[in-house]
Image (tube, grey):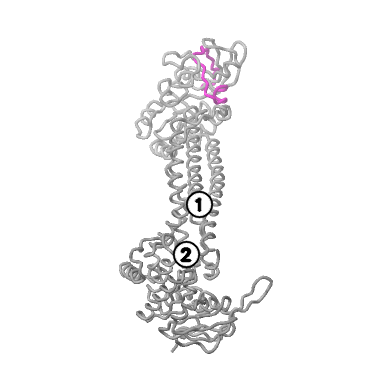
Amino acid sequence: MVTFIKIAWRNIVRNKKRSLITISAVGFGLGALIFIWSFVEGAHVQMTENYTSLVTGHIQIHQKGFLQQAKLETNMAGYPALLAKIRNMPSVVAVAPRIKAVGLISSTEASAGVEVIGVDPTEEKKLSRLAARIKTGQFLGETTDQDIVIGAALAKNLNVVLGDKIVVMSQALDGSIASGAYRVCGLMDTGAEEIDKGVVLITHAAAENLFAMAGRTSELAVRIKNVKDAKPAALQISEQLPSSFEVLPWQTVSPVLQQWIEFDEGFIWIIVFVVMIVVAIGILNTVLMGVLERTREFGILLGLGTQRGQIISMIAWESLFLGLIGCLAGLILGLTLSLYFHHAGIDLTVFTAALNTFYMDALIFPRVNFSQVVFSLFLVLSTSIIVSIYPAWLAARLKPIDAIRSL
Amino acid sequence: MPLIEVKNVSKTYVTGKNIETPALSDVNLWIGPGEFTAIAGPSGSGKSTLLHILGALDFPTAGAVIYNGRDIAALPPDEQSLFRRDVLGFVFQAYNLINTLTALENVEYIMLLKSVEPVERREKAVAMLKRVGLADYIHRFPNEMSGGQQQRVAVARAMAAEPDLVIADEPTANLDSKTALSLITLMDELNQEKKTTFLFATHDPLVMQKARRVIWLRDGKLIEPQTEI
């Protein structure tokens, strides 16, 4: 076996140009796979982080039935005790209460239907990035229950500026008309149209007053250490709460985003398939050329009594070596690119509008996923060996005397 | 008792549009153990074809090649391969060494196929290379040696695994007369030392003189009587 490995290795060294072409094909293929996967992984993490930090949180806890029909009646009384219990769970980073209701917001010139969210400013800052998206003015304060934050796009529609007064009207928990006047303290620009045009924020205390929800809340939004653990963490929290609560990971709250990510991952497989075809053709071409060039040599080996299986194993070793060196090159290329752009970011400002629709920023930061790197390695390496089967079979079925006579 | 026997062997090549070219016609021949025999004849007489059929590198159109009671021409490819490995040593006209292996590794190659232990394999290969006068060239690659040196490596390779029969197809054709004579003398010495049977094709009278038996071929047929020297 050692001699066949030696012959295989020396054949690679003997024809440096051909070997370099094969190694380049494998290297670029693997490098491209690692980079594409890192880019997509980075984009998905960013998409998920942005969405969950602006809208849903990683996990939501409601009185059962709230997800199906969000109404004030489906609320959690005595929530502060629940809040404290959840906050002490090991996987939880932050938890904040939210009162959610639909209402009508009016300025002196126009009005619009919105979702009114009452938030605890201090806890909300730990949980979400809403405060960080204030474009003009400031976020809600603890003692300013008459303040309201609205989207910059909504402000434009209502023709209001910072400091202007606006009125919110809705129906309270007790059935009475809920009405309150607020002063615009901040304009937020999240990039997501549905938030910037359709969400207003007031303090939780103000919302309790407005909607007659004293001591109650609609939702507890939870942030955990790693968004990818949302499902098991939700299950863990659920096990410690009474069955009258629903504990929902973001994937359940927003299946559309989850479906989009799954679709995107499915699309990546098409790209992977195309890259692998290119790699396979590259390797097949050079290995086949190598076999055809060495027909006489294989004839000699067969003539001396070498078994067909030994010829096949020799060519397979050759391909394995080429694959391994190519993979090493691809690993260096793919990881270098991915890690560089992980820090520098890939500037896609030109696509900002489209990216915002999917809760992505103009700068995408690729993230290397170890299991994807290992899988790419396996894929490229096994392809390089599989495509050597045909040339090896061709060499093994040569008639020794015909092969020896060939030029 | 012959070592190998050719019975009524004919070979016809079919080329182009079913054009049949007879290369051997009803050849009968036996080779005894320890012979040092030349197959002589002009170009196109069928010398190489006969050697290739004897060496299980080619198939006869008709007839049989008997070794140890078995028709080797009728064996499946893998068994023919084992026959070549275990019974034969080859010396080709164009040396046909493996370019990626050194002289030593080339000589070791067939022993490796026969699973000879590494230490024994190396000792035998070194001894054989010394015997053919290439002690200083054992780590050279074929392209670092002259034609004569390469052919000596080929002889060493053919002999190292101690075959019953060495088949040499025009082994001196690419060598100058001095080197050719030196090579055939070496083969003669090895034949006498090891009692290995040598069967070689040649049309060189100088080489023929060294043979102890010369089999003449013309137009694919044996010419009687065969010369016994």
Relative depth, front residue between B84 and A49: B84
Which badge, 2 or 1, comes first in the chain's sequence? 1
Q: Residue at x 54, y 70 (%)?
A: A399
Q: Eyeballing the image, is A240 above or below B201? A: above
Residue A353 in percent (x, y) is at 58, 27
**Which numbered dot is residue A311?**
2
Q: Eyeballing the image, is A26 above or below A243? A: below
Q: Residue at x 57, y 45 (%)?
A: A270
Q: Which residues are magenta?
A: A173-198
Q: In whole angstroms, how far apart are the C-alphas of marks 2 and 1?
A: 20 Å
| SS under mark 1 | helix
Tell me the subunit letter for badge 1. Answer: A
Q: Are the numbered discs 2 and 1 placed on the same chain, yes or no?
A: yes
State which quadrant residue B19 falls in. Answer: bottom right
Q: Which three-letter amino acid code belongs to the residue tagged 2?
A: Ile
Q: Eyeballing the image, is B117 above or below A280? A: below
Q: Which three-letter amino acid code belongs to the residue tagged 1?
A: Arg
Q: Which residue is mark 1?
A: A18
